[in-house]
Amino acid sequence: MDARKVDECRAIAADIAEDVQRYIDRHTSVGAERTFLRAYGVDGIDDQGAPLVNLVVDRYQKAGLLGRGIGYFLGRALLSGAKTVQDAAERLAYAPDLDAGDGGPSLLEVRGVIAPHAEEALARIDRAKTEREGLKAKHKAGPAPLKYVIVATGNIYDDALQAKAAAHAGADIVAVIRATAQSLLDYVPHGATTEGYGGTFATQENFKIIRRATDEASEEYGRYVFQTNYSSGLCMSEIAWMAAVERLDMLLNDAMYGILFRDINMCRNFVDQYVSRRFIARSGIIINTGEDNYLTTADAVEKAHTVLASQFINEAFARRAGLEEEQMGLGHAYEINPWIEDSFLLEIAQAQLIRQIFDRHPIKWMPPTKHKVGDIFFAHVHDAMFNLVGVTTNQSIELLGMFSEAIHTPLLMDRYLSLKATRYVFNACKSLGNEIVFKPDGKIAARAVQVLDEAVETLREVKRDSIWDSIGNGAFADVKRTRTGGKGYHGVVERSPDYLNPILEELERHAPSH
Amino acid sequence: MHPPTNPPRPLRAYGDREGDGMVQLAFVLQLPPSARAREAAKHFAEMHGLKEPLVATMEECAEGYSYFVVYGHSEHAVDVSRIDVPEVRTEALSREDIEHRIQSRLGRKIVIVGACTGSDAHTVGIDAVINYKGYAGDKGLESYKGFDAYNLGAQVENEQLAERARALEADAILVSQVITQRNCHKENAAALIDLAKKQGWRDGVVMLLGGPRIDHKLALELGYDAGFGPGTKPGEVASFLVEKLCGA
């Protein structure tokens, strides 16, 4: 592997992210401002089920005032007699006359009154982080690759049962998949939920319930059980905050996934991913990026380099949001057509390349899905080969394949059999990766070199065209999006010169240690 | 092994001898493994018509749950001559076929406009068919070079949809109706057809209806060209449109 090429990729990715960061730093969004309100401690819904944070932010956005930061108005409400943050938010939402922010207290006074609440917002995240670290020290995590499974019943109480069953069968990480299309809701539902199509709603209460179940599992099985959810879509930053305070361990969080696969407006997505990652950085949560998705739409052999290019970009954005490498679970997948000659070698090449380039990162290795069509017996063999690559190339996090992929969400039995087979392969081949070397002039090495070369080329093109236009040209996953198209663009707001946000300022004080 | 020249009727499952009826069943019972659980699995298999069931595997797959693999001889037989196959509306075409036919026979893109109409805010169906990500591993219409697809999203009024479709000179309109109360999905879907007739463009546009409570028969009754129920993959819709617009 040519280290200079890797350095070049990193340098180009940094420039690409920097260009977007200049935009991010001049904007905020309704999602971001709702997140800060929640962080100050605003909670609850009205009698129609609308979250208070939405009522406040929507009202100020409609009035064209959100560019000053919702914290500014919250502070003014506190100075004008509101007893608590909650009371202040209710005034902002319901007061007959809207405070347009003219006259009254000075900016300094507003800063002063909001400061202790901002401090408490950060302290709350820090407490959750400390508690997580304590539990991780008490119950040691299993060996890598960590075995990651998904539960998706739609009912959080059933999810809790299934999560414990999965932990019993050997799972290290349990993810609760979200209800279909939650990513397109511009609010976070409230309370415990028992009905969901294709998954379970991500709500703060649901996070509490499932965290309790996996804490119990850690205690019972003497092994730390990681809890995962999805920070994506129009509420990605609010969900990141909820996960931070409810002590989740990982979040699916990607700088570009929403743009490409959910048709979320790119301006909105870039602003929101930054805010979500600032909270994630502070909380010590590990992100899982979504490059595996590229290969479900584009060809896994021809477009392998776009995965690598995107990982460099995701890494660059994550660094700009203060994440440590150890928090960056860059994603990739075993999605090459299993029937092409030497497909297994191509998979090894890609997995080994990414492992070596991102050597400190908890790389997330995703199973075959695209070429699974319902033959469960063949699929089980397919997954075994995937597991073999995972353990041999020392991937950090492995989402287990399910033989019933493309048929239904996994049954209890499906998950059990997948865990059993994975346990076998991981254990039987534990030291295989340390025993083998790849021929320097062999097919595997040649493929790795080719993918890296193509990734450099792609990154150069993206930099030349800017990421805005590159996405417009279909550079990633063959999907094309425009700068002002997609969902949620109306929720992006330009920050005014006197934008006030002490929470973000504090989050931004932290820079990665490397 | 010789292929059977005259398939016997009625048909039994084929293990390794004609007529042995051998099948395999895998399932979970809410019991920890025990002699009693094994017997329960046997009974369960027998109730499904399996003779001489053999419990090949019994393992605890979660606390208090056992997973079983059972083999047995099914006594059931199928009379193939009595099977009534529901009408297959279109042949499923491959992605290559779809692209090729559009390019060679139409010579331009097929323009489609889709929406979830009326008060319905559930875009899961229309998104699955149109958006790139698709459904169950099958990519949406956006992913085809031969389709120019516009997903207008949810809560689109019929008038709005009609106006947009005409402005884009759409070849086809896809209407999704997910949530329904007191049959409002039917009324709303029918109203769009009425509007199209009144404005005089119904015959120039292929109109499709989809949703969990929609089937082909209902869609035809409401005046649509076809109906697509739950589990429809984007490729099926693409195939139908190609056959309809580019000829079989």
Image (spheres, coloured by chain):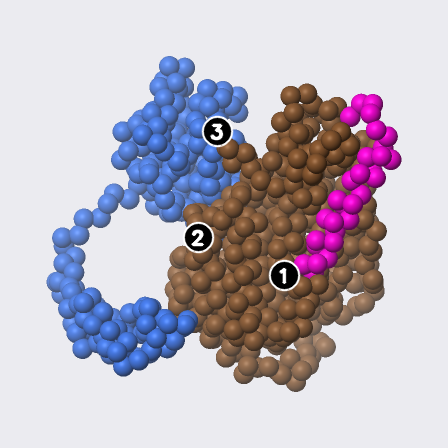
Chain colours: A brown, B blue
Chain for mark 2? A
Three-letter code, disc 2: Asn
Q: Residue at x 47, y 37 (%)?
A: B123
Chain for mark 3? B
In the displayed structure, B197 sits above or below B243; it is above
Q: Within the image, what quadrant is residue B187 found in?
A: top left
As drawn, is B204 to the left or to the right of A44?
left
Q: Secondary structure at mark 3?
A: loop
Mark 1 closeness class: few <14, some 14–19, many ≥20 residues within 10 Å: many
Inspect the magenta stretch and tell me whether residue A28 lies in it: no
Three-letter code, disc 3: Gln
Q: Secondary structure at mark 2?
A: loop
Inspect the magenta stretch and tell me whether residue A115 lies in it: yes
Q: CA distance from mark 2 to mark 1?
A: 21 Å
* Residue at image mark 2: A155
In the displayed structure, A12 sits above or below A67; it is below
Q: Which mark is residue A249?
A: 1
Give the magenta part as a residue range.
A101-129
Co-location on one chain, circles 2 and 1: yes
Q: Is the C-beta separation of discs 2 and 3 under 8 Å?
A: no
Using the image as rendered, state which of residue A318 and residue A130 is in the foreground.
A130
In the rendered image, the quadrant that contains the C terminus of chain A is bottom right
In the rendered image, the quadrant that contains the N terminus of chain A is bottom right
Percent of width and height locating residue A439: 69, 79
As drawn, is A348 to the left or to the right of B121?
right
Can residue B147 be seen here? The reply is yes
Mark 2 closeness class: few <14, some 14–19, many ≥20 residues within 10 Å: some
Q: CA distance from mark 3 to mark 1?
A: 37 Å
Chain for mark 1? A
Q: Which mark is residue B155?
A: 3
Percent of width and height locating residue A190: 53, 43
Q: CA distance from mark 2 to mark 3?
A: 27 Å
